[in-house]
Image: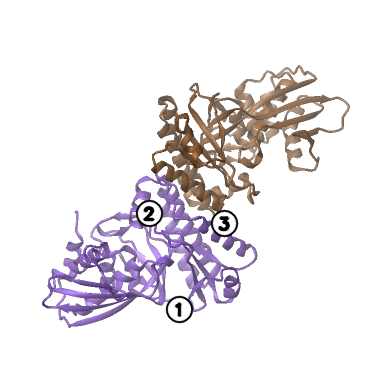
Chain colours: A brown, B purple
Amino acid sequence: MNLTQNDVAAQLLAECMPDPVATFEAFAPVNIALCKYWGKRNATLNLPVNDSLSVALAGKGSTTRLTRLPNAGGDEVFLNGTAVDAGSRFHKKVVAHIDLFRATVPGFLRVETRNDVATGAGLASSASGFAALTRALSGLYGLQLDDEQLSILARLGSGSACRSIYNGFVRWHKGVRGDGMDSFARPLPESWPELRLGLLTLTGEAKKTGSREGMQRTVDSAILYGSWPEQARRDIARLEHAIVQRDFTLLGSTAEQNAMAMHATMLASWPPLLYWQPESVQALQKVWQLREDGVQVYATMDAGPNVKLLFERASAGDVYAAFPELELIIPFE
Amino acid sequence: MNLTQNDVAAQLLAECMPDPVATFEAFAPVNIALCKYWGKRNATLNLPVNDSLSVALAGKGSTTRLTRLPNAGGDEVFLNGTAVDAGSRFHKKVVAHIDLFRATVPGFLRVETRNDVATGAGLASSASGFAALTRALSGLYGLQLDDEQLSILARLGSGSACRSIYNGFVRWHKGVRGDGMDSFARPLPESWPELRLGLLTLTGEAKKTGSREGMQRTVDSAILYGSWPEQARRDIARLEHAIVQRDFTLLGSTAEQNAMAMHATMLASWPPLLYWQPESVQALQKVWQLREDGVQVYATMDAGPNVKLLFERASAGDVYAAFPELELIIPFE
């Protein structure tokens, strides 16, 4: 039962009746996980160990335009207006994702992707990028895939991309099947207009260990990772309750503890995996001091040194005063 | 079965035939844990969740002289030559420890303690302090307690003090009994003359959360703590093997992973417990860079921001070049 990505895509696309158009553009938002995706049960198909839950950043993400190139000998890839070298990792990943569909609909494409967010801010552009590419491929080929099918196909490009198919709060159900056909994301019906996110770009230094490799090292070597699935289970339940009740203290504290627990599993790996820089410690200490001073602000961090803040509109002034360099994001605009 | 410390001490001292002298002095070394004591199964008696293993720092520790004061109305306590205020926490802890023996041998004492190590370096002076005090009390009263009994009594003052009864490598057996009569330390027969420790005093800032409180918060709130006993079990076995085989890479890597895993359980607590300062991250990054450059050096950390280095004599030059401010300690002199 060693399925390839192509096996899964072929199965999903088998009943589609392609009806291609010449060009198609799609958008997908960036998402920030409040309960993290950390650890795979199947690395080929990006099947996770645990459910995760994110919030999409309305209007911030990737826009991808695809154009069919009837006479070309290969795909052309542009990122933010610049041609991407065919030998690069980025180019190869995009081509590999198109290949999943090419078995069904042959031919090469021009791919023009624009990201609204700077990569340095620690927002995972691969999630919005693969979600936008998947949505654009479905549109270009007229495949009429539903959102859950799009979510599965986006997941094959990058795990967390399956959440970027939707706006708002999104839960990725890990599923139990070996082929991952039950491992996709679904949106939650609730919105939270008062919710704010603050991005702190502390350092642009490139990380030594990618998140794919870091995740694998943690699963393979951290004894403490054994308790992570229980952590995620508890946190998902708390977050859903917090969202339904609009209980910000519960939402923020759960998201922060979940992020710290994820970084804890990395630290407990061998060799120790620490994405933090000295500035990360300073920022966290500042967040904790703000809370001691009565400001309801919480932190979350992904596989990088930057810190993201969670707060509500009423606290924005206090948070800005402490972090004047913060980039404000309103997820539910 | 809610035993007090006095119940345990009375049981231990019941068969002693006191034969007091006028004054007695004892020394006990500081110890640094390679597998940490983190979490109590009984907070009153300082009974641990897991076995721990440490190395004593030969010649660095606490020297305590006790003198009987036949006509005094209370104990007099001096630390490094200065009288300690009777209302202070330090004074109260010393008196409480003497009280464990006072039920058997009445009368007040003058306590003169000198510590060889600055508290700022992150060396736990309470471990050597309570071990020296316990040894001095036994000597002053002529109680003829053996080392395991001394270890149990020292543990009542401060858990890790039970290890400071001995020189060299020491293992604290957690025991299983409710009264803790099987929870004491024993020395390992091996020595390691080439072993070196380096102390880095990164910051003298007082910590906000004591280790007793931090330990309790971790046990109470960190889901990841559920995997800590397994971590400690594996690490103890690896360390004993490394010591017998004199395998420094195994010793160092196990000690570092154990320390990082302990800090990971703190980080996964709520609220998050981070003893690190930005300087701690810098020092760890430097250690990891040194290892990438081929220098066999490992880090350990206790409930504070400072970093302790483990290396062998052959690497001392390289380690000094990277950390010129390092305080060198030779545990087996």
Q: Position of residue A171 (x, y in %)?
A: 52, 29
Callout 1: few (<14), some (14-19), or many (20+) C-alpha neighbours within 10 Å? some
Q: Is residue B123 above or below residue A230?
A: below
Residue at image point 39% right, 63% down: B52
Task: Say whether disc 1 or disc 2 marks the residue closer to the N-terminus.
Answer: 2
Visible in this render: residue A229?
no
From what the image shows, is residue A109 above or below residue B184? above
Instruction: Tell me the residue that label 3 is attached to.
Output: A271
Q: Which quadrant would residue B285 be assigned to in this image?
A: bottom right
Q: As rendered, which of A26 and B6 lies closer to the eye?
A: A26
Three-letter amino acid code of the residue under disc 2: Lys
Give the number of the mark in front: 1 or 2. Answer: 2
Callout 3: helix, strand or loop? loop
Label 1's element? loop
List the residue tagged with mark 1: B332
Q: Nearer the viewer, residue A139 or B115?
A: B115
